[in-house]
């Protein structure tokens, strides 16, 4: 279970509270407050706090652009204009604070997004729980033959079973040794800050992660992409659902202009225009490398 009975009781107590406020609230986000959305086998994402909504984005934009927004008929239209033309600061007026439980190797990918405020569970002060990420059999895959940082087809039969047995056994053995080293019964016990170095990267950690909406969208554009590693993508997918309820106009614009859009180089745009007037364009006369041409074809030929 990702949450203990005590933690679940604490969440229910938090959700049972209600406080009068003059601040703007987003009804969709209020429904998510404190709720733990399970991810992977022991992980979760839950909203601790937030600030702003779609209207806050428009409010900030109208202060900045003044008369320039008078032709925009509604908030949704203004938000789509801002997203379409890469105006970022109005989206920075909204913030979200998340409590996330995730495997350490996922956290090391996640932390590369350096535009957030993070406070992580400390294994120097506290003892980590015996919880490890063990992938489901259909996610135990071979190395990709075309992508050095990706996976290919799922392992089958005895090989898949052997890999899962190794992962489970190694995780248990490392934690047994961790407990043995820090145990102070009949011995001094190794310092926690040293004992933690023997733990594997699939053990779970937790952190509070606070970020503004502009930088959250950047995170989601990369991590909710189909090419992202599955184990971080499922966190991004869960966060996408939360954000869609929080700022529906902004999220729809993000879907249309970022998540579901593609970037074309000058050569790609030129080739597309030539194709539209009937010219036979090939990789050789396009000005693109072979790899660029494959990527271009993947966009225009997609069924």
Image (cartoon, rainbow, N blue to C red):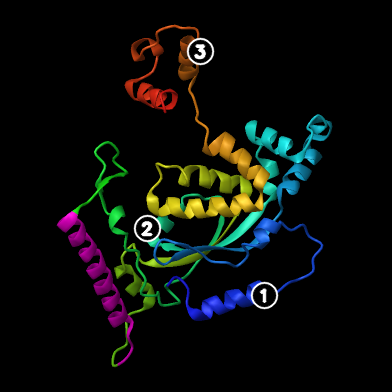
Report the front residue among 114 and 245: 245
Is 248 left, or right, of 300 in this rendering?
right
Mark 1 and mark 2: Cα distance apart in space:
35 Å
Q: Is residue 98 magenta?
A: no
Number of numbered labels in the structure image: 3
Determine which residue is flagged by label 3. Answer: 273
Horizontal and vertical percent position of residue 12: 60, 75
* Image-quadrant location for residue 284: top left
SS for dot 3: helix
Secondary structure at numbered mark 1: helix
Which quarter of the figure has residue 134?
Answer: bottom left
Say which label, 1 or 2, has the lower sequence index.
Answer: 1
Q: Residue at x 65, y 43 (%)?
A: 250
Q: Quadrant of residue 125?
A: bottom left
Q: Which residue is mark 2?
A: 105
- In whole angstroms, how far apart are the C-alphas of marks 3 and 2? 44 Å
User: What SS does tag 2 mark?
Assistant: helix
* Magenta stretch bounds: 157-185
* Quadrant assignment for the C terminus: top left
User: Would you name the residue on which mark 1 appears?
Assistant: 16
Q: Residue at x 47, y 55 (%)?
A: 235
Mark whose residue sits in front, 1 or 2: 1
Horizontal side of residue 119 vs 192, given as left or right: right
Q: Which x, y percent locates residue 190?
A: 32, 80
């Amino acid at each position: 279970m990702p949450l203990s009975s005590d933690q679940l009781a604490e969440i229910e107590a938090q959700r049972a509270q209600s406080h009068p406020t003059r601040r703007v609230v987003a009804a969709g986000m209020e429904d998510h407050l404190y709720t733990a959305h399970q991810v992977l086998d022991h992980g979760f994402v839950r909203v601790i706090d937030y600030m702003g909504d779609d209207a806050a984005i428009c409010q900030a934009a109208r202060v900045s652009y003044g008369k320039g927004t008078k032709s925009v008929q509604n908030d949704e239209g203004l938000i789509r204009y801002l997203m379409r033309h890469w105006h970022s600061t109005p989206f920075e007026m909204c913030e979200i604070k998340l409590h996330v439980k995730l495997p350490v190797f996922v956290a090391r990918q996640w932390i590369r997004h350096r535009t957030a405020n993070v406070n992580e569970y400390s294994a120097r002060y506290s003892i980590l729980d015996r919880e490890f990420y063990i992938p489901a059999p259909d996610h135990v895959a071979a190395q990709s033959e075309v992508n050095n940082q990706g996976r290919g087809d799922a392992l089958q039969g005895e090989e898949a079973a052997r890999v899962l047995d190794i992962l489970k056994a190694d995780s248990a053995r490392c934690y047994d040794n961790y407990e043995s080293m820090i145990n102070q019964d009949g011995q001094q016990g190794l310092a926690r800050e040293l004992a933690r170095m023997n733990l594997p990267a699939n053990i779970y950690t937790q952190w509070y992660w606070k970020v503004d909406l502009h930088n959250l969208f950047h995170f989601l554009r990369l991590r909710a992409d189909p090419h992202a590693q599955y184990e971080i993508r499922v966190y991004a997918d869960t966060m996408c659902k939360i954000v869609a309820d929080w700022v529906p106009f902004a999220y729809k614009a993000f879907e249309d202009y970022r998540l579901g859009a593609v970037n074309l180089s000058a050569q790609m745009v030129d080739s597309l225009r030539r194709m539209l007037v009937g010219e036979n364009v090939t990789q050789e006369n396009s000005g693109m490398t072979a790899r660029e041409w494959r990527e271009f074809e993947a966009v225009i030929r997609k069924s």
